[in-house]
Image (cartoon, grey):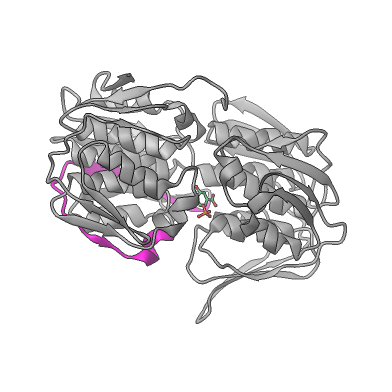
Amino acid sequence: MTHAAPRPLRAEAPRSPLSGRLGVPGDKSISHRALMFGAVAVGTTEITGLLEGEDVLRTAAAMRALGAEVTQTGPGAWRVAGRGVGGLVEPADVLDMGNSGTAARLLLGLISGHPIFAVMTGDASLRRRPMKRVTDPLSASGAQFWTREGGRLPLAVRGAADPLPIDYVLPVASAQVKSACLLAGLCAPGTTQVIEREATRDHTENMLRHFGATVTVQDTPQGRVITLEGQPELTAAPVLVPGDPSSAAFPVVAALLVPGSRVVVENVGLNPLRTGLLATLREMGAVLRVENERLAGGEPVGDIVAEYAGLQGVEVPPGRAPSMIDEYPVLAVAAAAARGTTRMRGLAELRVKESDRLAATAALLAANGVRAEIEGDDLVVYGTGGAIPGGGTVETHMDHRIAMAALVMGLAAQRPVAVDDAAFIETSFPGFAALMNGVAGGAAIGPA
Ligand code: S3P
C-alpha cells in the first residue's frame, strides 16, 4: 500500500438526510493488543471482531515473524497459538509496521524483553515519527537500540537476555509509551512501574488482567501508578473486540451536521478513557443517546444514537485530550459547522501523529473556507453556523483521519470537498465510503 497510486475521493451533500443503523470495524487499539498478547500467552486465543485494516494486519504479520501461529478463521475471527511469555523467536527479516505507530511502539516493548535481534521499519509517515519516546525508557530494561537520526525508523533492536523491570514516569500522555514499558516488563522479574500524570486508554492493563497478569492501578497525587508483576504465565483467553469509538466518530459527527439526520452506530466501545469526543459534542449541544449499554469482553459497549443538531462553539480543556486524542480532526469539522468559536487546548501531541495533525486539520479547514488558527498548542476554529463553504481539496499527508474528517465535512458543506488520497483510510476503517453511502442513501462519497 505504501507505494500504491494515490486514490482521490470527494464527498458532497447527500440528497436526503443520513438515516439508518450501521456498525463500524473493530477497535484498532484492542485489535493490536489481542494479537500481541495472544502471541505471548500459553494456549490458543480466539479473537472475534478483529479490525482487518492495514495497521492490524501488519501486527498479525509481525507476530507470525516472531514465531506465533496467527490464522484467520472467518470474517473478523482470528486464532493465535501463543508461545508463552519469553517465547518469541528472532524474525528472519525486517519487520515492516507500515503506517502504524501503535504496532511499532508496542512491539518494541515486547521485543525488548526477549533475547532477539530485530530490524524495524515503516512507511514514510511512520519513519518520520519519534521512537525515542519508547527507546529511552526501554533501554533501562537492558535492550539496545540503533536508530536513525532523531531516534527514527528504521531501527535495530537487541532485546535483553536478562531484562530489568522498568520504573518510569511518562513525560507525555501516551498509552503507547505506557504499554511499551508494561510489555517489556512481562519478561522481567519483579515489578514494573509506570506513572502517568494524565490517564490514557487502559486497554493494555485490562487485557493483561484478562490473560491472567497481576496489574494494579492506584490514583495518587503524583498521578496514576500502574504496576505489573513480572514473568506472569499469561493464559490464552477469548477476546471480543468492540467497534472502534474513533471510527464511530465519523458517522456520529456526520449525522449531527447533515440536517434531518438520525443514525445509530451499533456496538461501539465506550471505555471512559475513550469517550472525550462524546462529552465535548454534548457540551456543544449534540443530542447523543447511548442505548443497549452492556459489558462485552470486559469493556463497556453500546449503540450511539446521533441526530442532527445545531451546535455551539466550546472550549475543550487540555486535560480531555488523552480521551479523544484521535478525534480532533473530526471535532474540528463539527466546530466549523457550529455557531461561535471553539478553542481546543493542549494539542501538542497531535504534531506527532500519522501527520502533523494540528497543521493538517487547520489546513483542511482553511482549504474549505473556514477560518482557523493555531495559537501555541491550541486550535481555534471560527464556526460558520452551519454554512461551511467547502469546495477545497484537502492534502491528507498519509493520514487516514484527516481523509475521513475531510470527507465528513464534504457531506455537510455547500460545495463538495475532495481529498488528494483516501488510500490510507484502509489502515483503520476499511469500507468507510460504502458504509457512509449506505446511510446516505446514495453515492455521496465517490471518486474525485
Ligand atoms: C493508541 C494510543 C494513542 C492513539 C493511537 C492508539 C494506542 O497514541 O493516538 O491511535 O492504541 O495505545 P499515543 O499513545 O501516542 O497518544
Q: Nearer the viewer, residue 236 or 223?
A: 223
Taking 446 as reference, is 214 above or below it?
A: below
Residue furthest out toward the bottom? 221
Query: Would you say 189 lies left or right of 135 here?
Result: right
Q: Which residues are magenta?
A: 298-322
Query: Would you say 16 lies left or right of 168 here?
Result: left
Examine the rendering and report whether any part of residue 212 can be seen.
no
Examine the rendering and report whether any part of residue 367 can be seen.
yes
Write down the quadrant of residue 337 in the picture.
top left
Quadrant containing the N terminus in the rendered view: top right
Q: Residue at x 24, y 46 (%)?
A: 334
Q: Position of residue 29 (x, y in %)?
A: 53, 46
Q: Position of residue 63 (x, y in %)?
A: 72, 38
Per the image, is 303 magenta?
yes
Q: Residue at x 26, y 22 (%)?
A: 444
Q: Residue at x 32, y 65 (%)?
A: 317
Q: Position of residue 165 (x, y in %)?
A: 76, 67
Q: Nearer the viewer, residue 367 or 63?
A: 367
